[in-house]
Image (cartoon, rainbow, N blue to C red):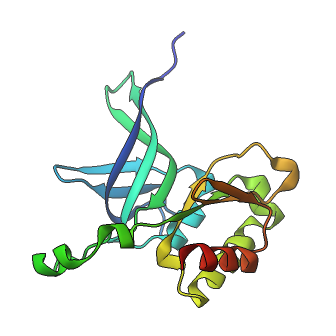
């Protein structure tokens, strides 16, 4: 007997977050993403739902990557994300074209990335509190806009959970305290 869903391909799209969709209030299963030509509804895996709903707000420019599957019974294509990250390219619609052209895109682009594991083992061992502490440390030093925080699946280092990786240029750092990350970023980005 064949599988109900057939994997088609991986996708990687950028667009504007329109909002979240779910059966019950406060419990979201999907995100709505506006592209230039159409609107997509993408399923968010359980491990990512909580962190995505807390860190993103409608209107954010985001990048979503995942897999598309074909439902063999209905012929419908379903999209399921395995990673969601803000792009930092948010431009308000009311901003004039003069203001847009005067901004330096190289200066506004995030120069550092932090990959955070969102699997249940990492979250149970303090991943959620670590992420909140990291965001507050970055926010207190006004570094949050210069850093991209990406939510990932398993990083295959479960024994040292919670897992996160800081990418600064060609260097990688793991198992660093959030205040130390903020200090490293301050040195690197200034």
Q: Measured from the top left, where is residue 30 in percent x and y?
A: 43, 54
Return the residue nearer the eye: 19 or 144. 144
Return the residue nearer the eye: 89 or 61. 89
Give above or below for 44 relative to 182.
above
Give above or below for 184 relative to 50.
below
Q: Residue furthest bottom?
A: 140
Q: Measured from the top left, where is residue 55 in percent x and y?
A: 52, 71
Q: Measured from the top left, where is residue 27 in percent x and y?
A: 53, 64
Circle count: 0
In percent of the image, x 63 and y 78: which residue is there? Answer: 187
In percent of the image, x 53 and y 86: which residue is there? Answer: 142
Give above or below for 154 relative to 129.
above
In percent of the image, x 82 and y 48: which residue is there? Answer: 158
**Left or right of 91 in this view: 177:** right
Residue 117, visible in the rendered structure: no
Quadrant of the image occupied by residue 126: bottom right
In percent of the image, x 73 and y 72: which residue is there? Answer: 130
Give above or below for 67 relative to 150.
above
């Amino acid at each position: 007997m064949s599988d109900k869903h057939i994997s088609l391909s991986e996708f990687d799209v950028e667009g504007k977050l329109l909002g979240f969709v779910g059966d019950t209030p406060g419990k979201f299963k999907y995100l709505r993403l506006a592209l230039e030509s159409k609107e997509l509804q993408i399923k968010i895996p359980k491990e990512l739902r909580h962190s995505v709903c807390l860190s993103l707000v409608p209107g954010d420019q985001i990048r979503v990557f995942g897999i598309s599957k074909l439902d063999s019974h209905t012929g419908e294509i379903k999209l399921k994300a395995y990673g969601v990250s803000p792009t930092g390219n948010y431009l308000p619609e009311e901003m004039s074209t003069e203001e847009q052209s005067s901004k330096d895109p190289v200066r506004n682009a995030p120069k550092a990335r932090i990959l955070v594991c969102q699997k249940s083992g990492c979250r149970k061992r303090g991943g959620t509190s670590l992420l909140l502490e990291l965001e507050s440390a970055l926010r207190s030093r006004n570094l949050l806009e210069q850093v991209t925080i990406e939510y990932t699946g398993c990083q295959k280092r479960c024994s040292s959970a919670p897992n996160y990786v800081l990418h600064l240029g060609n260097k990688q750092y793991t198992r660093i305290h959030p205040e130390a990350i903020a200090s490293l970023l301050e040195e690197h980005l200034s």
